[in-house]
Image (cartoon, helix red, strand yellow):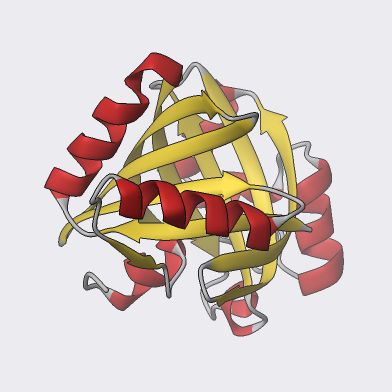
Amino acid sequence: MEVEVKLRLQDASAYRQLTSILSPFHSKTLHQENLFFDSPTNTLSSQLSVLRLRFLNKDARCIVSLKSKPTLVDGVSRVAEDEEELDPCSARACVEDPARLGKIESRILKRVKEEFGVGEEVGFVCLGGFENKREVFNWKNLKLEVDETKYGFGICYELECESEDPDGVKKLLEEFLKENGIGYSYSKMTKFAVFRSGKLP
């Protein structure tokens, strides 16, 4: 179970202010391309599950993940997540021809076939996706991820932090944001939900 605090930053100005204040703690920048797949009849979505290919820093790496039964309440996200690395060249070929996903050697895609009945026979379709620039900071023994997410219909900014003590971390982050006058609110939708809705929250 992945548990994360997710706070939506008010606008680009809040994003710039936060990344500037955190700059002494900067660890790395990740350029992510997130693409989502389902069956032609939306088998996974109908069971509150998401299959994602994430390409990192162009095609340096690719991670396939299966997320199930997400909840997002008061800025705290909980989701069952399973992921593994895929060969980026093979994964990119699956974007061009989603049917290849049913033939690829992968523990997660085997799970998708066994648990949801989606595989080579049923086939996959690519739902599209979005790009995300993730700035990672090591701050007060926490790994903070500040995202600039570019959808086809606009840009969102978000602060995320995975933690086993989400309420404590949320309190700490809220105090930090308020002290620095950075506008924020609790995230109410996952990035995938925003993408599927076709409009900014």
Q: Position of residue 72 (x, y in %)?
A: 56, 74
In the rendered image, the vertical position of residue 183 relative to residue 12, given as above or below: below
Q: Is residue 146 left or right of residue 156?
A: right
Could one spot residue 84 in this view of the protein? yes
Q: Pick out the residue farthest to the bottom.
A: 46
Could one spot residue 127 in this view of the protein? no
Who is closer to the viewer here, 123 or 46? Answer: 46
- Which residue is at a point 65% across and 29% down the rendered structure image? 141
Q: Position of residue 181 (x, y in %)?
A: 23, 51
Q: Position of residue 35 (x, y in %)?
A: 44, 49
Quick one: quadrant of the C terminus? bottom left
- Which residue is at a point 56% across and 61% down the rendered structure image? 124
- How many numbered markers are drawn? 0
Quadrant position of residue 120? bottom right
In the rendered image, the vertical position of residue 181 relative to residue 135, given as above or below: below
Q: Is residue 26 left or right of residue 118?
A: left
In the rendered image, the vertical position of residue 53 relative to residue 81, given as above or below: above
Q: Pick out the residue farthest to the front.
A: 179
Q: Position of residue 121 (x, y in %)?
A: 70, 64
Who is closer to the viewer here, 45 or 125? Answer: 45
Q: Is residue 63 left or right of residue 112?
A: left
Quadrant position of residue 195? bottom left
Quick one: quadrant of the N terminus? bottom right
- Which residue is at a point 33% across and 55% down the rendered structure image? 178
- Which residue is at a point 38% across and 15% down the rendered structure image? 24
